[in-house]
């Protein structure tokens, strides 16, 4: 397509201006930005709930919130952070970057893309609105295990709204995932064979497969739960011949791949940032690609390690223990390959690089505490304690959120044409890095000391560490404030970042840096060729 | 100095002293701090085995990370970056060596898992543990004892076998000092065993079970055998309880009900139980 034709195409697609344009757009870049803004807003709301939780846990006798409300806050913190913040953030970066990186003009199904985004809005309204229905929001934890989540024990409609929201979010994720798969399979630039696909795109291919295979199982489990609640079925009700353990298997068959869904795109981002900032080509591209697939495939065989104390047989636990530990091998390959990518390089300590290296620090701890949790005799000692809380926050905050910060600092100039302040970025990094380790590191100790998770109040001997943990929260809060201010401040600057502000293409060619910042609606005047 | 300032100082000193005393009095036993059963000792030893094999990998990764950060930072001396981006022997090594270590960690843990699962043969005492929102009910079928919202009392140095179930939602029976944790699910029977040292052990429900989940505590008292027999005598022959010396047929666990059958507890047994 010539430049002229492409411009005409843009004129044809932009039927409205201003707000109406955003509401009707099918442009993958605008949808991607909306995903990211949506994610940031929900990150603030979900993070505020975490703040309330930490205030409540500062003193076991304060009872700032009732135990019912505590359970709701804890449930909604997890739901918002997982479904509305992390998944949407990676969808946003994927939407924005995947077509650019493969040299396409848009996603394969632009309208489906917009539909998948707009489904998030009713889902979010249902989740937040559920705080205001009789009985309040869902309070059974984000696993929502029956029988606690059945009508007998959670009669309020908060639970129903939660189930419906999760189903809606699942539909949105499945549509998005199919879109990613078709886009990458069909619309790669000429010459971009599968061994030349950038790792962020690879990470989204694996993630999309995981979404397509895992999320329908969750939706099915949710429909069965809803049906148990109001249609008198007995899938999970022992009195009718059902079994609550069935739900746990279905939920975690989704729930464990979900963890990788929330971290693999982050792996992909870091695999772009580290080479660019170390000024050296990525080490072991093929090993990285194989490791992504290995994590994606083995990730489907480990779900019952969440159920080591649920009464499943010792023989089943042997298998799930072994498979869970096996995942640490490809994960280790990635860690070592990133370190080898830095080895011999000339490092620029930009904010994105600080976050990428900080991510390695925190993720190593999160990954290896996960390996320990796969050791059944150890798991039994700390299952459902704060050790697990520490572990998955090291994975999701130390892993996913750190990579998202890194990706934001790295691609913000491409998305907006403006640089984020590196000076403020340094503050964001150090405050967040210190804050997150301050908050989550002592939780390992609390767990080993036997403090259960999901409790609104605790025994007095746990108080001093809990107070210490709560005092770390303001650091993360301040980092979030500076980060948000930094974005707003940058948007008021002129768009003068240039096409390739990090000189990434001098290290390793990646097509998103070959178009302007921000890119035109048609992305590339000429579809680039890859040799 | 103003009196306000002095009283604030005194208050701070008092608070700090209280916190210190709390810390010193903390006696939540765990399998790591003070294992109180053979299961806890085996689990703690196995955990340490895993720690010692895994911690070197944390240190290696952190050592490399710190090294590359300082060694390869841009010193502004015009050094050119290296150009290598592949090394098959290296990649083979960092795939295979961790795989071998992981296999050792896994295989070494399975005998311990087997012991924790199947090691409690010929139990001296069977207790049926029933989870309720939000208390535990302990039934000693051989002695006709049924207590609720009370301390679980068991003999020391003998195999105690717990059969767990629930009448409402899923609960988790977690006593860190004994190294045991198992869910109690409605419609299912799960099993735990331990052989404990004398002492008092704290635990709590470890599976979110509703609003008062955090108040669903567990206390286990492990008594020397003579004291345990005295406790049994004091509790077993109560009017309305099952026969004191139950015939062998009645000593079988009372809760081997078919899956799906809902347990129905008389309201009296639910709240008060047979206490004295």
Image (cartoon, helix red, strand yellow):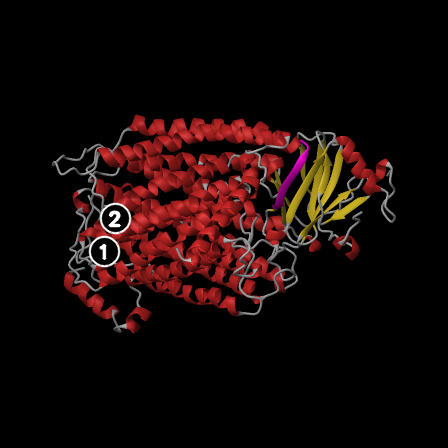
Quarter in which the N terminus of chain A is drawn = bottom left
Q: Which mark is residue A351?
A: 2
**Neighbour tally class for label 1: few under 14, some 14-19, many 20 plus, Cα within 10 Å:** many
Please give the name of the residue rendered at 37% of the width and 42% of the height, measured from the top-left corner.
A362
Please give the name of the residue rendered at 49% of the width and 30% of the height, measured from the top-left corner.
B50
Q: Chain of mark 1?
A: A
In terms of image quadrants, where is residue B250? top right
Front residue of B27/A303: it is B27
Quarter in which the C terminus of chain A is drawn = top left
Are discs 1 and 2 less than 8 Å apart at CB? yes
In terms of image quadrants, where is residue B183? top right
Q: Which mark is residue A420?
A: 1
Front residue of B201/A21: it is B201
In terms of image quadrants, where is residue B173? top right
Relative to B144, is A509 on the left or the right? left
Relative to A388, is A335 on the left or the right? left
């Amino acid at each position: 397509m010539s430049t002229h034709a492409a411009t005409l195409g843009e004129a044809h697609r932009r039927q409205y201006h201003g707000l109406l344009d955003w509401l009707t757009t099918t442009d993958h870049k605008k949808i991607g930005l909306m995903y990211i803004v949506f994610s940031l807003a929900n990150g603030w709301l979900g993070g505020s709930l975490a703040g309330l939780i930490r205030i409540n846990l500062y003193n076991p006798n304060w009872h700032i919130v009732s135990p019912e409300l505590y359970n709701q806050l804890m449930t909604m913190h997890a739901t918002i952070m997982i479904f509305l913040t992390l998944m949407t953030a990676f969808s946003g970066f994927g939407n924005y970057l995947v077509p650019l990186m493969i040299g396409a003009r848009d996603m394969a199904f632009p309208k489906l893309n917009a539909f998948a985004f707009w489904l998030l809005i009713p889902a979010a309204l249902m989740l937040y609105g559920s705080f205001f229905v009789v009985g309040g929001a869902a309070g059974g934890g984000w696993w929502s295990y029956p029988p606690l989540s059945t009508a007998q024990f959670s009669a309020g409609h908060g639970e129903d709204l939660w189930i419906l929201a999760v189903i809606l979010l699942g539909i949105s994720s499945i549509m998005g995932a199919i879109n990613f798969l078709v886009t990458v399979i069909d619309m790669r630039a000429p010459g971009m064979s599968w061994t030349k696909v950038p790792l962020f795109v690879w990470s989204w291919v694996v993630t999309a497969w995981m979404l397509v295979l895992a999320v329908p199982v969750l939706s099915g489990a949710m429909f069965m739960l809803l049906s148990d609640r109001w249609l008198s079925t007995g899938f999970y009700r022992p009195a009718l011949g059902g079994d609550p353990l069935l739900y746990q298997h279905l939920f975690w068959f989704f729930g464990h791949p979900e963890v990788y869904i929330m971290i693999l795109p982050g792996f992909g981002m870091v695999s772009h940032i580290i080479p660019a900032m170390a000024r050296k080509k990525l080490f072991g591209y093929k090993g990285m690609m194989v490791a992504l697939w290995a994590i994606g495939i083995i990730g489907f065989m480990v779900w019952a390690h969440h159920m080591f104390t649920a009464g499943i047989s010792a023989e089943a636990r042997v298998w799930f223990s072994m498979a869970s530990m096996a995942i640490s091998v490809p994960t280790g390959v990635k860690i070592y390959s990133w370190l080898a990518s830095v080895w011999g390089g000339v490092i620029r300590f930009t904010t994105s690089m600080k976050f990428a290296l900080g991510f390695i620090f925190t993720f190593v701890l999160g990954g290896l505490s996960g390996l320990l949790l796969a050791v059944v005799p150890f798991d039994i000692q700390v299952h459902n304690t704060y050790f697990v809380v520490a572990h998955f926050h090291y994975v999701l905050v130390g892993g996913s959120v750190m990579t998202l910060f890194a990706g934001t600092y790295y691609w913000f100039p491409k998305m907006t044409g403006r640089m984020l302040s590196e000076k403020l970025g340094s503050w964001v990094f150090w405050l967040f890095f210190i804050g997150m380790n301050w908050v989550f590191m002592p939780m390992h100790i609390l767990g080993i000391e036997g403090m259960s998770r999901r409790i609104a109040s605790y025994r007095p001997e746990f108080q001093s560490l809990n107070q210490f943990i709560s005092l770390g929260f303001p650091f993360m809060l301040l980092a979030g404030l500076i980060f948000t201010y930094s974005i707003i401040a940058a948007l008021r600057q002129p768009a003068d970042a240039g096409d390739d502000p990090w000189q990434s293409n001098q290290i390793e060619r990646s097509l998103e840096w070959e178009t302007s910042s921000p890119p035109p609606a048609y992305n590339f005047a000429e579809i680039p060729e890859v040799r | 100095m103003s009196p306000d300032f002095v009283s604030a100082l005194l208050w701070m000193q008092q608070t700090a002293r209280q916190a210190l005393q709390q810390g010193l009095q903390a006696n939540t036993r765990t399998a790591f701090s003070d294992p109180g059963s053979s299961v806890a000792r085996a689990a703690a030893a196995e955990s340490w085995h895993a720690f010692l094999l895994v911690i070197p990998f944390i240190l290696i990764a952190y050592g490399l990370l710190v090294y590359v950060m300082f060694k390869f930072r841009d010193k502004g001396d015009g050094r050119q970056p290296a150009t290598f981006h592949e090394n098959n022997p290296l990649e083979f090594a960092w795939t295979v060596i961790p795989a071998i270590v992981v296999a050792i960690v896994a295989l070494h843990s399975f005998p311990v898992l087997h012991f924790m699962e199947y090691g409690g043969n010929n139990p001296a005492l069977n207790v049926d543990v029933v989870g309720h929102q939000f208390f535990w009910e302990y039934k000693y079928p051989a002695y006709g004892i049924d207590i609720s919202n009370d301390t679980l009392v068991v003999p020391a140095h003998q195999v105690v076998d717990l059969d767990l179930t629930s009448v409402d939602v899923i609960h988790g029976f977690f006593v860190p000092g004994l190294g045991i944790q198992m869910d109690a699910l409605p419609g299912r029977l799960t099993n735990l065993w331990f052989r404990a040292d004398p002492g008092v052990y704290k635990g709590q429900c470890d599976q979110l079970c509703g609003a008062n989940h955090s108040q669903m505590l567990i206390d286990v008292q492990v008594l020397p055998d003579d004291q345990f027999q005295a406790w049994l005598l004091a509790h077993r022959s109560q009017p309305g309880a099952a026969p004191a010396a139950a015939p062998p047929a009645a000593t079988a666990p009372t809760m081997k009900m078919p899956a799906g059958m809902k347990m129905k507890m008389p309201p009296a047994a639910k709240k008060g139980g047979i206490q004295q």
